[in-house]
Image (spheres, rainbow, N blue to C red):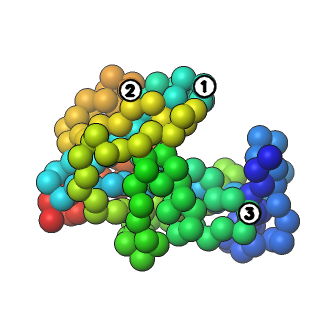
Amino acid sequence: MEFNDIYDKDRNLTGRTHRRGTLWRKGEYGLVVCVWVYDGKGKLLLTRRAPEKSFAGTWENSGGAVQAGETSLQAITRELREETGIHAAPEEFELLESGRDKNCHYDFYGLHRDIPIEQVVLQKGETDDAKWVTLDEIHEMIRDNQMCKVIARQFLRQEPMLKERLIK
């Protein structure tokens, strides 16, 4: 059973926790983290959601819910390692954007990491494929409904920031 810290609308911790899978009450917010891994050669790393997940078979970046007691950076370090096998120190991540929606605060990070796709280790039950893609390929995937819709919206908003980082 997984628990998440509960935040208020201003991202202050309330001292209470929420059990994952249950409904959020009005005025309660969780924290979600995601990372755009880029290779410095013009490509971003995407993973495909496993068949047993919501939005099964769609592509996304790595990320997930921050567990109770974790910081945003601790969570993104854990999520990336769990979903891809990529190890990175918290100080290697660059915060690109923070925001809030209906019941969630979120942090989007960037990470420069050039590794062969064969070295990506997928997490059973979470991810079932991975690939490096260009921005044009992501736009094509969005048009073809291959991207997770939530991540597609975030990508379109963050694309200008990502373009600055893709070629290092």
Residue to which mark 3 is pinned:
68
Pair 2/1: label in front: 1
Q: What element carries label 2?
A: loop
Callout 2: few (<14), some (14-19), or many (20+) C-alpha neighbours within 10 Å? some
Residue to which mark 1 is pinned:
52
Callout 3: few (<14), some (14-19), or many (20+) C-alpha neighbours within 10 Å? some
Dot 2 or dot 3, earlier in sequence: 3
Nearer to us in this view, 109 or 145: 109
Q: Given contact means CB atoms under 8 Å apart, are the residues at marks 2 and 1 in contact?
A: no
Q: Residue at x 72, y 69 (%)?
A: 69
Nearer to us in this view, 138 or 156: 138
The residues tagged by marks 2 and 3 sit, at their Cα atoms, a distance apart of 32 Å
Q: Which residue is drawn at 52% across and 29% down?
A: 50
Left or right placement of residue 163 versus residue 88 in this view: left
What kind of residue is marked 3? Answer: Ala
Left or right placement of residue 76 versus residue 23 in this view: left
